[in-house]
Amino acid sequence: MSHQYHFAPAEGWLNDPNGLVYEGGQWHLYYQYVPQRQGGPKHWGHATSSDLFHWTEHSVALFPDALGEIYSGSAVESGSGEITAIYTNHRHGHEVQSIAVSRDHGMTFVAYEGNPVLDRNRSDFRDPKVFPYGGEWRMIVSAMTHAEVYASSDLRNWSLLSEFRSGVTEWGWECPDLFPLPGPDGLERWVLIGSFIVPGSDHETHYWVGDFNGTEFRAETGPHQLAFGPDDYAAVTWAGAPGDRRVLIGWMNRWTYAGLTPPERPVGPMTVPRELSLRQTRNGLRLAQRPVAELEALRQPEIVGRSAEIWASLEPGQAVNLIFSGAERVFIRRTDTGEIEMDRTFSGQADFHPAFAGAWKSGPVDSPQIQILVDTYSVEVFADGGLVYGGMLIFPTGNGLTVQAPKGVIREVFGLQP
């Protein structure tokens, strides 16, 4: 069995989403890719979709070269039919930023002869996210203890503008993203997302809301947790999305056990694509995340296999049980203190690492309504109007899915098939 509506390559290894760009009516998803699942140098894999759920895999887009492996980065439309990828080359611990240009709508790339375009002689200097600003380009890139902002007029020559620090010196930065969003008052705000290596906690993803003046980002609120579940990392957004949409996707796995998941199962996929907006709460502006509207086209009247969308209303002390076989099940609870809890302790294959079986809690939520997305090997939960999101892998051995809950809890159930 394979994932039904979450992207994963047919074979090989996948991790961070890279080079997300909308061009020519297609959502381009590049991603960290190793053709052999058991390990090897990083490439950029490539897939495209017109609706974010039906994906076509293409040939490898970027291969390791004389400057090293191809680590994470971004892409922008830099001309009619032209896409420029900006990425990290990693070689013997030395990390530099390089570019490659595609003139066939992102299908093939030619590396710039003058690479690297940015070299600070560092070992932890990676994951550039480039975006247009005021007729020029800006780059935010991780520098382990902080993020740095650079400027360029041609994507080839970069000058340092500013630094941003999380305030927690133990956090190691990865995969930053910086983008504008309209606030509920119609005024533009900027959101900075960072994925962090956290000692004693593997990794976490956080965000800040504030202002960007073209030179520096100034946080007004944050850091706030982007996802409470165990399996969402390196989440970044698409460039050039139509209608000024801001769509985000993450890697649905965790470095603690990513290389140990059952070899007979597919690799961990990307998360469901999530549409972002800003909402005013009693504690200030917060990100709201919703599955993109294109998901609705996948709805079927009955569940086939293990792919479903469940709408429920959970009061404190109530739960939805996702049953895959007699003993294999996932619990989605609302605790007595009002938190959402995802529990995969008895979800199936879970003994390959001690950190896999367990439960994860959000903070207290105000609304009882939750949306649960189940795929063959994953569960995702959206709560509190999108203010709360959590995702996790599961590896049941049973083939079906039964939804069980107290009377009145389940509102709607759909099968989901691409």
Image: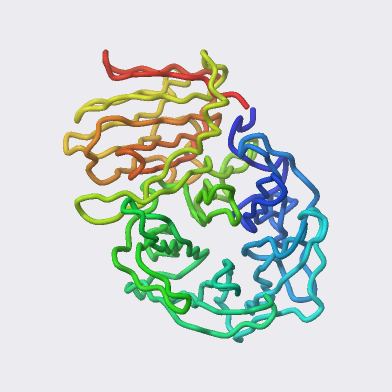
Residue 352 is situated, as x and y percent measured from the top left of the image, at: 51, 43
- Farthest residue, direction front: 186
Quarter of the image for residue 203 reads bottom left
Vertical comparison of 265 with 280: above or below: above
Residue located at (29% from left, 31% from top): 333
Residue 127 visible in the displayed image: no
Residue located at (65% from left, 75% from top): 97
Residue 208 is situated, as x and y percent measured from the top left of the image, at: 36, 63
- Farthest residue, direction left: 337
The number of numbered badges drawn on the structure is 0
Q: Quadrant of the C terminus?
A: top right
Residue 102 is situated, as x and y percent measured from the top left of the image, at: 79, 61
In front here: 389 or 212?
212
Residue 230 is situated, as x and y percent measured from the top left of the image, at: 42, 47
Residue located at (35% from left, 55% from top): 225
Residue located at (53% from left, 25% from top): 307
Left or right, residue 334 beside residue 171: left
Residue 306 visible in the displayed image: yes
Left or right, residue 211 beside residue 262: left
- Give the image's coloring scheme: rainbow
